Image (spheres, rainbow, N blue to C red):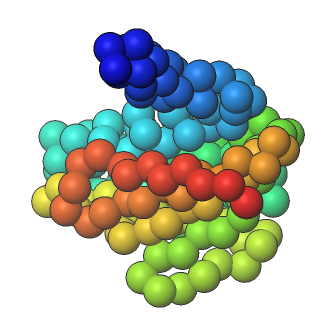
């Protein structure tokens, strides 16, 4: 009985540590970028009292931040605000306020000075078949990440 309990505890501790290693580094880095930058953007919009927009160019797989909703091109002069998805990661779907955006069009997600944001779900897929949904909730600072198989 003790041996079975110890094996159960070992499996309970080891599986969550092994599972992330099964994903590609590019996929994990992409999901981490969202999970780290969504709360940062919300705090920055509140502290600067100006709306900020996370722009996603689905065709090029590029993301950048600006204070204008109409930014058409990713600014080359601000590489710290620019992230490019690796070739092994694809943006499958972006849904905000019940709207699904076209495959190639740009998307702007708004972070307002009062601490809210657009309700958005971004679905990323990796070459290894792993899928992650990134949920940006209007009133929560952290993004909710849900992993599932394809």
**Is 27 on the left-hand or right-hand side of 143?**
right
Q: Position of residue 87 (x, y in %)?
A: 85, 40
* Number of dots carrying numbers: 0
Q: Which residue lies at the image location 56% right of the left edge and 40% below the top edge?
A: 31
Q: Is residue 21 above or below residue 143?
A: above
Q: Position of residue 99 (x, y in %)?
A: 53, 85
Quarter of image, res 18:
top right
Q: Which residue lies at the image location 60% right of the left edge and 82% below the top edge?
A: 100
Q: Position of residue 129 (x, y in %)?
A: 78, 50
**Toward the viewer: 31 or 83?**
31
Quarter of image, res 110:
bottom left
**Is 137 on the left-hand or right-hand side of 4?**
left
Q: Specify the quadrant that holds the N terminus.
A: top left
Is residue 48 visible in the rendered image? The answer is no
**Is 103 on the left-hand or right-hand side of 51?**
right
Q: Which residue lies at the image location 81% right of the left edge and 59% below the top edge?
A: 59
**Toward the viewer: 17 or 111?**
17
**Is 110 on the left-hand or right-hand side of 125?**
left
Q: Which residue lies at the image location 14% right of the left edge and 59% below the top edge?
A: 114
Q: Position of residue 37 (x, y in %)?
A: 41, 38
Is residue 95 visible in the rendered image? The answer is yes
Q: Is residue 43 above or below residue 13?
A: below
**Toward the viewer: 86 or 73?**
86
Q: Specify the quadrant that holds the C terminus.
A: bottom right
Quarter of image, res 105:
bottom right
Residue, far bottom: 98
């Amino acid at each position: 009985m003790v041996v079975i309990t110890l094996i159960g505890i070992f499996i309970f501790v080891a599986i969550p540590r092994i599972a992330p290693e099964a994903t590609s580094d590019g996929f994990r880095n992409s999901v981490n970028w969202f999970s780290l930058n969504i709360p940062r953007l919300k705090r920055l919009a509140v502290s600067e009292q100006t709306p900020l927009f996370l722009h996603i160019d689905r065709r090029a797989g590029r993301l950048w931040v600006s204070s204008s909703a109409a930014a058409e091109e990713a600014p080359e002069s601000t590489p710290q605000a620019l992230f490019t998805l690796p070739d092994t990661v694809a943006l499958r779907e972006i849904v905000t306020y019940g709207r699904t955006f076209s495959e190639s069009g740009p998307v702007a997600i708004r972070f307002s000075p009062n601490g809210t944001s657009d309700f958005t779900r971004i679905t990323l897929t990796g070459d290894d078949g792993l899928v992650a949904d990134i949920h940006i909730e209007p009133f929560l600072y952290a993004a909710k990440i849900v992993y599932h198989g394809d």
